[in-house]
Amino acid sequence: MAEDVKPTRKNLMEIEDRIDLSERGHDTLEQKRDGLIMEFMDILDQAQDVREDVEQNYEDAQQTINMARAMEGDVAVRGAAAALKEHPEITVRSNNIMGVVVPQIEASRVSKSLDQRGYGVIGTSSRIDEAAEAYEDLLETIVLAAEVETAMKKLLDEIESTKRRVNALEFTVLPDLYESQDYIEQKLEEQEREEIFRMKKVKDKKEEEERAKAESESESEAAADAGTAD
Amino acid sequence: MNVISRDASNYSYVNARVRSRWALLLDADEYDTLTRMGPSEIARFLGESEYSPEIDALGSRHSGVDLVEHALNRNLARHFDDLLEWSQGTLYDLISRYLRKFDAWNVKTALRGVYSETDAGVIDDDFIRAGEFDDALLGTLEECESVESVVDALAETVFGDPLADALDDYEETGALVPLENAVDRTFYDTLLRGLNAATESGTREFVKFLQAEVDFRNIRNAFRLARSGGTIDPSEYYIEGGRLFEASELASLVENRDELVARLRESRYGDQLGPALERLESADSLIGFEHALDAALLGYADHLSHVFPLSVCPVLAYILAKEREVDNIRAIARGREVGLSGEEIEQELVML
């Protein structure tokens, strides 16, 4: 509260410094927020595309595995799936977008050639191949979706916190500082006026004393002159 | 089993029994009825048909479409076991060669199950007991602790040496591909071994059929390899015994799919596969083409069974027709389970 601040010139200077800093911080954060929103809009478009791809690829993968289970039998599909224990390798690195650290996810060994899927080529059919291929595509899209959606979520969090900081500066910190500045300035002006008034009073008093003193001296001189004349 | 037994074969007896089994196969009207049923209705329908012993036996352990699938596999095994039981001499040898594909299936099932540390009970359920392996051997395989012990357990079978040879590759790569390919290759190698000198007309035609099957398997794999791209050596997956390709020719054709299609058009199978090849050129998927190959083999076997009624050909045609029936019923049940329409399912069925 402005009333809590001591209305001194030193405090006024400090508050002016803080106002200057806060205004610059406010401008910078506004620019950051706008920049983040632009980045977010780009990622949002990408995320919508990726999400559609995930849904489409999931439907395709389900369709192909359903057909494989129907035509080849559940036992054959389970058997082909059991012929490989190796999992795809997922590596996560970080990428910096305007100070926001977002993950960059890369998956290796997801798409495989026919001889890398574990099951024998000679005794299987293309239904199994197509089901495996559809799930490889789905997994790649899911990894991409994880990267894009995590980046989107982190950007959203950062936009939200930047927005809160901008609002705090704009609607709380700066108005409080302006209020304190006004309060101190008013108080200092008031003190100045009081000082001038007091100085005036002192001056008047001194002048009156001097005048009284001069009058008494002139009276005593006049009395001395009258005694001499007698 | 590389030498054909010279005992007297009982073609007449076996073919008479097979003809009675043909009568039990579902007809087009019954397929039509099945495609309009839900999975539980299909299980009930099968429970009232000749599949009832299997449905009753497995009903307490499985339900829904899993029950249907396991019952179909067990029924298939029962019928094919009967074929081996009825037949003698050369006929037994010829049938057992062809049914060894189920031994290959069971070896792969055991390898995959042990490799992925699957419960022995689940592996047991997935076996199709239609080949020559007895219950004791299958029991040993499902209880094995490691892939190496599965290979050891198979040492006395035809798969023993090829698997032992492929074991180094498996240990190097950690993937089952070399072992599975060794199993499938052994099946095809032993299928035709010693048969080329056959003198009986029916057996000669049987050999032609097996050669066509090998050709179709090579064609199928060539298209799959061409589609997959990468740096796979096609000759590693070439099966010898067919009449269409040499390994070197196949390797060059895999690199150019258009040339492969053109080569097939000009081949002995050009007329049968022509429409499927046209569809293949406009579609990315091989599934329709594989259907055409299956249908062509089925039709060829059926044709042979009529031309050579007192040979192994009617038995072979029955084996293919029975397998196809099992595939079709399973496709209908699984298709209905996942919500496919009757029309969609009918498109996927392969019938004579």
Image: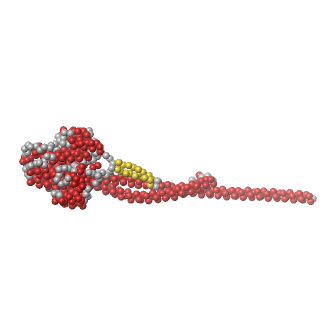
Residue A95 is situated, as x and y percent measured from the top left of the image, at 43, 52
In this rendering, the answer to whether B285 lies above or below B12 is: below
Q: Nearer the viewer, residue B5 or A179?
A: B5
Q: Nearer the viewer, residue B339 or A158?
A: A158
Residue A60 is situated, as x and y percent measured from the top left of the image, at 28, 55
The N terminus of chain B: image quadrant:
top left
Toward the front, the furthest residue is B248
Q: Residue at x 17, y 41 (%)?
A: B133
Image quadrant assignment for residue B131? top left
Residue B349 visible in the shown view: no
Q: Is residue B29 left or right of residue A83?
A: left
The C terminus of chain B: image quadrant:
bottom left
Q: Is residue B321 left or right of residue B223?
A: left
Residue B177 is situated, as x and y percent measured from the top left of the image, at 26, 46
Q: Nearer the viewer, residue B179 or A50?
A: B179
Residue A27 visible in the shown view: yes
Residue A84 is situated, as x and y percent measured from the top left of the image, at 28, 46
Image quadrant assignment for residue B9? top left
Q: Residue at x 44, y 52 (%)?
A: A101
Q: Nearer the viewer, residue A228 or A122?
A: A122
Circle count: 0
Q: Which color scheme does this rendered protein use?
A: secondary structure
Q: Residue at x 60, y 52 (%)?
A: A5
